[in-house]
Image: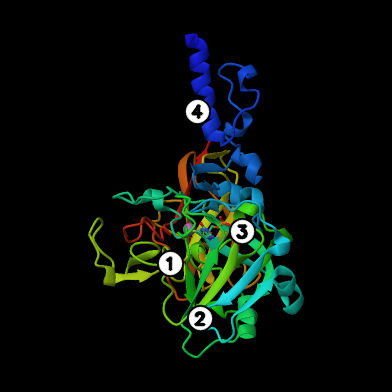
Amino acid sequence: MKRRNFVKKTVLSSIATLIGVDIVFGTTMPNGYQPIILQDPDPYKMFNKDKGMEVLNDRPWNIEAKAHLLDDKITPNKFMFIRNNGLIPENIESKTWTLTIDGESVKQQKTYTLADLKSKFTEYTYQLTLECGGNGRSEFDPPAKGNQWTVGAVSCAQWTGVRLRDILEDTGIKDNAVYIGYHAADTHLSGDQKKEPISRGVPMSKALQDETLLAYKMNGEDIPLAHGYPLRLVAGGWPASVSGKWVNRISIRNKIHDGTKMTGTAYRIPCESIVPGEKVKDEDMCIIESMPVKSLITYPKSGAMIDQGKKLDIRGHAWAGELEVTKMEYSIDFGATWKECPIEKPVNRLAWQHFSASVDFPKKGYYEVWAKATDSKGTSQPMILPGWNPKGYLNNACHRIAIKVK
Ligand SMILES: Nc1nc2c(c(=O)[nH]1)N[C@H]1C(S)=C(S)[C@@H](COP(=O)(O)O)O[C@H]1N2
Ligand SMILES: [Mo]
């Protein structure tokens, strides 16, 4: 065999290995051609995301928004961050999808189709804030491993579905129930079907709240595949990792759920604050529950320029886990002084709230606008980084934007 043909044959067979089947007309395939099936997928097209979104990882897919993209009161899909721990399930058939409720503390194990859920239970719609526990991780020092989220791993879409409580009451809950844990259809990165990428849960008190939904719609439409089609758990105000996507089983547990990413440093922080970098004993780690108070300036975009003598209208959102934001302030002098501005009531519990202000700048030059929210218990956002923790969770430092007055 001529060397050129030999090279082509070996290249062909290695491409065929990647594809998994033979390339039937491989000999007529142009030299150096990359078959479409091996070309990199365009995540923006694949997930219908705005081109301004930032891809942090492609295996698994992790994509975040930027502050100015989150200006809408209800986050549309194109600006919604994607956080995956494993591989998105393929070939989902909503007609044959089922949800099973089982576990040590279920009275009667039951399995429901989506049609059962929709016909047997009352439908509710809530706008719910979902923020990744690791949002803001990129600022921690020493750095924490994981996706380097800046500020854009938060969303507040409108979710429609049935109350988890109604389903759990339909199966019956034993007196010894402590926690629920979800199981889902995504695949572990290793491809090992026995391993779960993530399987988290919440205490019964959170599971039984009015706003904890098993949702089949997002913003009035079928949930986009990347966000959990055809069924996802939505528990607003808590780290979004408890809002299981592609959920097909929920266990009522007689102990704290011990699924993947419930233990060690995953979604757990030192119960007491520690020196940055310090090792923490396993028994001194606590599971993250309600997310801390936080806010985001969504208009204008950082770096905006305005003319001297003009006021600048700023706006954004604030949220506080299980609590409400009761006070909103901004500073243009690096936090030396603060001015209060109006904060709207949430449309429903666990939805983010909106603030706006008309800001006056005394003269030409560089400024930063810092925003600070305070929750109903009187806790405010820290101006800079809060307590260090091994995985870089819960960075709720004041959001800051740059402004030039010319
Ligand atoms: N089945 C499943 N559910 C999941 C995840 C996952 O990887 N698999 N990631 C969780 C995490 S860590 C977050 S922050 C949210 C992200 O939700 P989103 O991708 O819809 O924004 O989904 C949670 N639910
Ligand atoms: Mo997350």
Question: Which residue is the site of mark 2?
Answer: 204
Say whether mark 2 is within 8 Å of ligand 1. no
When asked about the image quadrant of residue 44, the answer is top right
For mark 1, does the 10 Å Cα neighbourhood hold few (<14), some (14 to 19), or many (20 or more) residues?
many
Q: Are marks 3 and 4 in contact (CB under 8 Å)?
A: no
For mark 4, does the 10 Å Cα neighbourhood hold few (<14), some (14 to 19), or many (20 or more) residues?
few
Say whether mark 1 is within 8 Å of ligand 2. no
Q: Amino acid at mark 3?
A: Gly
Say whether mark 3 is within 8 Å of ligand 1. yes
Q: Is residue 142 visible?
A: yes
Question: Which residue is the site of mark 4?
Answer: 14
Q: Residue furthest right?
A: 119
Instruction: Name the spot of residue 312 as percent of width and height, x first.
Output: 59, 48
- In space, the residues marked 1 and 4 are separated at their CA atoms by 58 Å
Q: Nearer the viewer, mark 4 or mark 2?
A: 4
Identity of the residue drawn at 64% across and 72% down: 348
Tell me which numbered mark, 2 or 3, is placed earlier along the sequence. 2
When asked about the image quadrant of residue 385, the answer is bottom left
Q: Are marks 3 and 1 in contact (CB under 8 Å)?
A: no
For mark 2, does the 10 Å Cα neighbourhood hold few (<14), some (14 to 19), or many (20 or more) residues?
some
**258 with respect to 77 (left or right):** left
Determine whether the residue tagged by mark 2 lies in a helix, strand or loop: helix
Question: Which residue is the site of mark 1?
Answer: 380
Tell me which numbered mark, 3 or 4, is placed earlier along the sequence. 4
Instruction: Name the spot of residue 32 as percent of width and height, x first.
Output: 55, 18
Q: 287 and 263: which one is in front?
A: 263
Q: Residue furthest front?
A: 1
Tell me which numbered mark, 1 or 2, is placed earlier along the sequence. 2
Tell me which numbered mark, 1 or 4, is placed earlier along the sequence. 4
